[in-house]
Image (tube, rainbow, N blue to C red):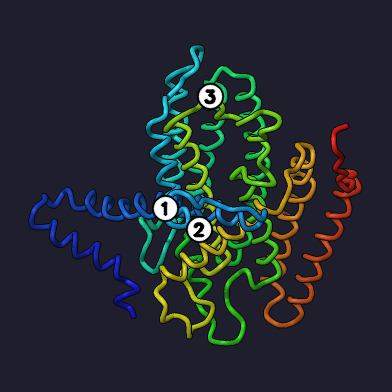
């Protein structure tokens, strides 16, 4: 099974050996880099098309309606039809827009989304660049998205686009803080910023309890907080206020059409895939099986199965939760998410210093539940959240 597990690594080495007799030796590092990058440029856009189809079908099931069912069997060719439509649609740029910045925004968004994949380990020995500070690199590059969103809204010279951009930037900055803080606990326990090393710290258990970080009190709380913040970072329901159709139409990319609009669409999904893959790496054991007995399955199969499970959770969330108000969105970030992630850092420290045994489970679990209850009650009282009342217009 090691041959199947390292199939893609062996294929890369075989291709490098074939190129060694043809290309100069100075070109070998560049060829090696291209052989690592090209599969990512093929796999994840393909996953984007599959995700769009799965999301439409899933939302159709959740909302008791049909999903795509006209183009191809079961609507499987609908993503291809949408892509062709985006390519042939006219590219309209507002007369007053800053054309250079308007063009750069979607290109930078997709470029940034692809760049973070360089440090994600998709299997054993399957990482483009193994940086010692890979987690720091991921977040440092990811912050460019805020600048890109503002570029798109400002360059459009449209008040709705600018309002959508300001909403999005405020939301992304607010939820990026708990997103980063939720990963601090993993760094504290693993003792490294290298993503492959964090995966190795969650090696399969030989006993009855898995070694994944999510199976600890601080890990479970951190994973939930990470998923919520990632959902907000991706502008997905119930945090899709920058694209509130009833208020600001399409948000910061309202003035984009054709292939540029498709690039924004692609960039958002690529960012969602990247942050989901990061969650799998940090909390769900990465490419590892939960138990040693499951290691016969190739490591990259385990990784992508977990990734698909997290994406299915995001689809389920989008189909079931209503959109928040702007004040609820910001209050939830600053009055619940950030304090909860800071408390979780303290809980992870206690988990480390108390030592093994049932005492630390009791103490850390009680602290997680107590913090959640107190912060939740305080948020409900301060926000004065009332049950929603739906009325027909008279």
Q: Can residue 118 be seen in this view?
A: no
- Which mark, by number, is residue 59? none
> Of the residues under marks 2 and 3, which one precedes in the sequence?
3
Q: Is residue 280 left or right of residue 174?
A: left
Residue 29 position in % (x across, y down): 23, 52
Quarter holding residue 3? bottom left
Of 394 and 102, nearer the camera is 394
Q: In this view, does 86 lie to the left or right of 18?
A: right
Of 88 and 332, nearer the camera is 88
Of 258 and 60, nearer the camera is 60
**Which residue is outermost to the left?**
21
Please give the name of the residue rendered at 48% of the width and 83% of the height, measured from the top-left corner: 292
Q: Is residue 166 visible?
A: yes
**Disc 3 to disc 1: CB gap under 8 Å:** no
Instruction: Identify the residue under disc 1.
Output: 72
- Which mark, by number, is residue 277? 2
Q: Classify 10 Å Cα crowding around label 3: few (below 14), some (14-19), many (20 and above).
A: many
Location of the N terminus (image quadrant) = bottom left
Instruction: Identify the residue under disc 3.
Output: 255
2 or 3: mark nearer the eye: 3
Quarter holding residue 130? bottom left
Residue 11 position in % (x across, y down): 24, 65
Task: From this view, report whether residue 327 is shown above or below residue 354.
Answer: above
3 or 1: mark nearer the eye: 1
- Secondary element at image label 3: loop
Please give the name of the residue rendered at 46% of the width and 23% of the height, measured from the top-left corner: 101
**Which residue is outermost to the front?**
70
> Of the residues under marks 1 and 2, which one precedes in the sequence?
1
**Disc 2 to disc 3: CB gap under 8 Å:** no
**Disc 1 to disc 2: CB gap under 8 Å:** no
């Amino acid at each position: 099974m090691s041959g199947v597990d390292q199939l893609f690594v062996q294929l890369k080495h075989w291709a490098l050996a074939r190129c060694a007799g043809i290309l100069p030796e100075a070109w070998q590092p560049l060829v090696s880099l291209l052989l690592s990058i090209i599969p990512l440029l093929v796999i994840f856009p393909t996953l984007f098309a599959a995700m769009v189809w799965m999301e439409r079908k899933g939302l159709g099931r959740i909302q008791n309606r049909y999903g795509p069912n006209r183009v191809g069997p079961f609507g499987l060719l609908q993503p291809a039809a949408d892509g062709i439509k985006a390519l042939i649609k006219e590219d309209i740029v507002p007369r007053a827009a800053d054309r250079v910045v308007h063009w750069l925004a979607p290109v930078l968004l997709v470029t940034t989304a692809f760049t973070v994949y360089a440090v994600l380990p998709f299997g054993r020995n399957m990482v483009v660049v193994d940086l010692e500070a890979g987690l720091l690199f991921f977040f440092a590059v990811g912050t460019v998205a805020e600048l890109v969103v503002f570029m798109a809204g400002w360059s459009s010279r449209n008040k709705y686009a600018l309002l959508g951009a300001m909403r999005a930037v405020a939301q992304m900055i607010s939820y990026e803080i708990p997103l980063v803080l939720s990963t601090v606990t993993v760094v504290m326990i693993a003792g490294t910023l290298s993503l492959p090393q964090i995966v190795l710290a969650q090696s399969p258990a030989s006993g009855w309890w898995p070694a994944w970080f999510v199976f600890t009190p601080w890990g479970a709380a951190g994973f939930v907080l990470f998923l919520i913040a990632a959902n907000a970072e991706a502008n997905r329901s119930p945090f899709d206020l920058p694209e509130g159709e009833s208020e600001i139409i399409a948000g910061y990319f309202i003035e984009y059409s054709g292939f540029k609009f498709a690039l924004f669409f692609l960039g958002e999904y690529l960012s969602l895939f990247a942050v989901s893959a990061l969650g799998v790496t940090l909390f769900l054991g990465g490419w590892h099986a939960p138990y040693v007995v499951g290691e016969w399955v190739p490591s990259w199969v385990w990784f992508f199965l977990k990734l698909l499970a997290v994406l299915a959770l995001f689809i389920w969330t989008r189909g079931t939760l209503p959109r928040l108000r702007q004040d609820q969105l910001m209050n939830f970030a600053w009055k619940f998410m950030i304090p909860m992630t800071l408390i979780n850092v303290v809980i992870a420290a206690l988990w480390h210093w108390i030592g093994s045994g049932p005492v630390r489970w009791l103490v850390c679990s009680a602290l997680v539940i107590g913090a959640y209850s107190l912060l939740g009650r305080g948020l409900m009282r301060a926000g004065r959240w009332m049950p929603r009342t739906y009325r027909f217009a008279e």
